[in-house]
Image (cartoon, rainbow, N blue to C red):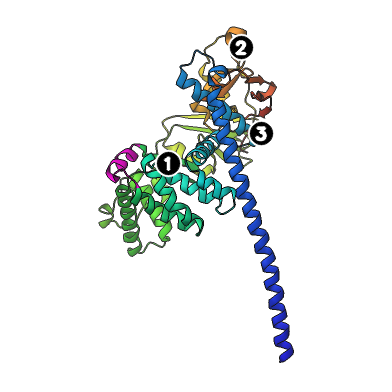
Amino acid sequence: MTETITSAVRAGDAYAAQLAEFSDEYAEICRQQAVLAARAARLLARSAAYADALADSVVPAVYPPAERQALSRRSTCAALAMATRRSEQTVQRATNDAERLVNEAPAVLASLEAGRISARHAQTITDQLRDVPTAGRAAFLDAVLPVAEATTNANLRKRARVLRERLHPESITARARRSEADRRVEFEPAADGMAWVHLFTTAPIAQGIIERVEAAAAESRRAGDTRTCAQLQADALAALALTGVTPDDVASSPVLPHPIEVQEHITPTVQITVPALSLAGVSDAPATLDGYGPIDPETAARLAVNAPGMTRILVQPETGAVLSVSRDQYRVPADLQRAVRLRDGTCRAPGCGRRARACDLDHSVAWQDGGTTDVGNLACLCRHHHRMKHLPGWDLDHQPGGVLDWTTPDGKRHRTEPDPAPF
């Protein structure tokens, strides 16, 4: 018995020693990550200041002063984004946060550099600081930093919101009125034929939507529907948005429609891309829904039934290539526009995901410089990258097969290739 206890004590001691080694090393890694995050913040803030200082010499004088500064910043962020394979929006947000941290919250930056808080803690503080007027920032930072150094980021988010509200010198009425202007809906594709729809609106409206969704789902559940609560709530919201079904309506017919029934209320203009082997019936490769990506053939067929018109595009099974259509004119005809947008899928600047249908069709070699209007000289560029391409230091070389070679002002080269066929 004594030997058993002794053995257990030794095992416990060994476990404690090993656990201490793990926790110490992990804590040191996290500290180093915080140090690197502070270093990155200082670099991004410095790059923004440099872009501002050189805006007049980097951007042509044809642009007004305010626009020159904005273009200089965006050019700098674009180069950083391409070098790190990140989106420009991500780098722009990181730069804005870095400037706020470096210039407005030096004590928070010092705590981050010392490893007392993590980058997420610092992000939470700067997020809350964004809307605090200058008069209230010192008091807010003095109150929130000790909390950040003593608790988890999740708890900090709750405490920071309360502190910001209590110390904010501006009334909540004025802030709510200003924030209401930012309401919007965002679409986010997900895997396996699914997607997210995000609604940013006022708290009362959001709460009202949730209550109506929950009420409709609960009513359907009481009527014997076997779908899960999560499924019923999702289907209730889809029904509310697409068919107008509300809790009042389900009082007489409490069972909510299934998503397949709701889809019947969608009237799209369908552009379906189909591989030739699928058209011949020897393959079950998916169709492509413009703006989303691959969807199953059955869903595509249901959508097509309600479409007032449909464009069917056949692609080569192995490469997905679309035949070139040349024109000896500047204006891009509809069929050629369709071919280029289908080939590119998105803006062809590295890292940009703006849909091709929302982009300009740019002549890689300008028409006035002898460029032709064909797929070998056209590419989809969003308005921002279309303008950026013409700034000093930027260069675009259009290679065969729709391959684009970009050169950024720092001399680095980045290649983008046409959107691959999704089959």
> Taking 32 as reference, is 309 above or below it?
above
Pick whichever of labels 2 and 1 is earlier in the sequence: 1
Q: Where residue 165 sits: x, y (%)? A: 35, 50
Pick whichever of labels 3 and 2 is earlier in the sequence: 3
Q: Quadrant of residue 229?
A: bottom left
Residue shown at the point (46%, 16%) measured from the top left: 64
Q: Residues within 10 Å of mark 2 (few under 14, many from 20)?
A: many
Identify the residue under disc 2.
372
Q: Quadrant of residue 364?
A: top right
- Front residue of this view, candidates 44 and 359: 44
Q: Residues within 10 Å of mark 3 (few under 14, many from 20)?
A: some
Amino acid on which disc 2 is placed = Thr
Q: Where residue 208 sits: x, y (%)? A: 30, 51
Identify the residue under disc 1.
130
Q: Which mark is residue 318?
A: none
Identify the residue under disc 3.
317
The verdict on residue 378 being magenta is no
Are circles 2 and 1 on residues that touch, CB within 8 Å? Answer: no
Q: CA distance from mark 3 to mark 1?
A: 51 Å
- For residue 149, say whether it is visible: yes
User: Which quadrant is the N terminus positioned in?
Assistant: bottom right
The residue range painted magenta reads: 168-181
Q: Nearer the viewer, mark 3 or mark 1?
A: 1
- Secondary structure, mark 2, is loop
Q: Where residue 86 sits: x, y (%)? A: 60, 37
Secondary structure mainly formed by the magenta segment: helix
Q: Nearer the viewer, mark 3 or mark 2?
A: 2
In this image, 169 relative to 369: left or right?
left
- Secondary structure, mark 3, is loop
Amino acid on which disc 1 is placed = Arg
Q: Where residue 152 sits: x, y (%)? A: 51, 58
Q: Residues within 10 Å of mark 1 (few under 14, many from 20)?
A: some
